[in-house]
Image (tube, rainbow, N blue to C red):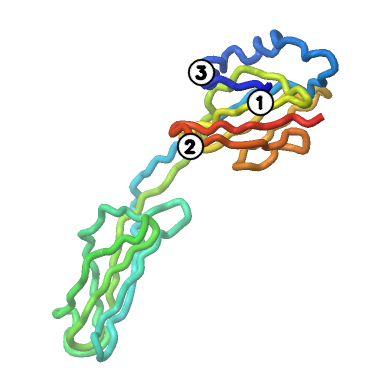
Amino acid sequence: MNHRLIPLAAFALFGALADGASAQQPAPPDGARQLGTCVVILTDLTTTETPTGLPAYGTCITADGGNRSCTATIVPTGPDVILDVTNVDSLASCLPADGDDPCAQIQSGPIMFQSERHATQTYSAYVGRARMTVAIRQKRLQQQWHDRPPTERFPLIAGRMFDVLMYRSAAAARLQCSMADGDQRIFPIAGNADLSPQIRFVSKNSAEPAYEVITYRVTP
């Protein structure tokens, strides 16, 4: 197979050499058209969790008759916060709705976390009705994106193929290119999609546990 493989070591070692490497690329063979030169940049996503002073609340009112139970549902107060799944000993508050002191005979089940964004707790009252409110601590999510050093610069030659090594630990990847006409282009790498009408997806090799090898063809 006549195509260029971007080596694994390039992601870690050639970031500082990218500008120098671009000046050392050999000229394409006679008759081959070079569309530009590119580097691959992988991006990592770091997420930190910080406790907040604002809890998430869930409320329900026990039924009048039957099993006299209700289930409170607790969800975070915003899109950038999650429930603290270690907060399994949270105490609920009880407010009588009617009857003879239903709060004196309330029984509660365990807090059940379906996910970091959804929890439930069930309560049973044996006399009257009671309004139950449970509070669960929350944590705020803060995300930061960090680019890894770029790979060695390589040419886009019409009719040729090249490989990109996509580490599974990376959150995103992109091709950053200096085109022959002077344009600076960025091509996000996503799944099995073509990067552009002239950079076409060919195949993906997922045999290795740490990375995937994605092959593209440069069309004339």
Q: Does the image show residue 43?
A: no
Residue type for callout 3: Ala
Query: How busy is the neighbourhood of tag 2: few (under 14 within 10 Å), some, or many (20 plus)?
Result: few
Question: Which residue matches tag 2?
Answer: 45
Residue type for callout 1: Phe
Dot 2 lies on which element?
strand
Label 1 and label 2: CA atoms lie apart by 26 Å
Q: Quadrant of the C terminus?
A: top right
Q: Position of residue 56 (x, y in %)?
A: 36, 61
Question: Which residue matches tag 3?
Answer: 9
The label shown at residue 118 is none
Q: Position of residue 16 (x, y in %)?
A: 57, 14
Q: Does the image show residue 21?
A: yes
Q: Position of residue 160 (x, y in %)?
A: 73, 25
Q: Position of residue 175 (x, y in %)?
A: 65, 30
Name above or below for residue 125 compared with residue 72.
below
Question: Which residue matches tag 1?
Answer: 162
Earlier in the chain: of badge 1 and badge 2, it is 2
Is 73 on the left or on the right of 209, as rendered? left
Query: How busy is the neighbourhood of tag 3: few (under 14 within 10 Å), some, or many (20 plus)?
Result: few
Q: Residue at x 23, y 58 (%)?
A: 88
Is 31 on the left or on the right of 202, as rendered? right
Dot 1 lies on which element?
strand
- Image marks 3 and 2: residues in contact by CB distance under 8 Å: no
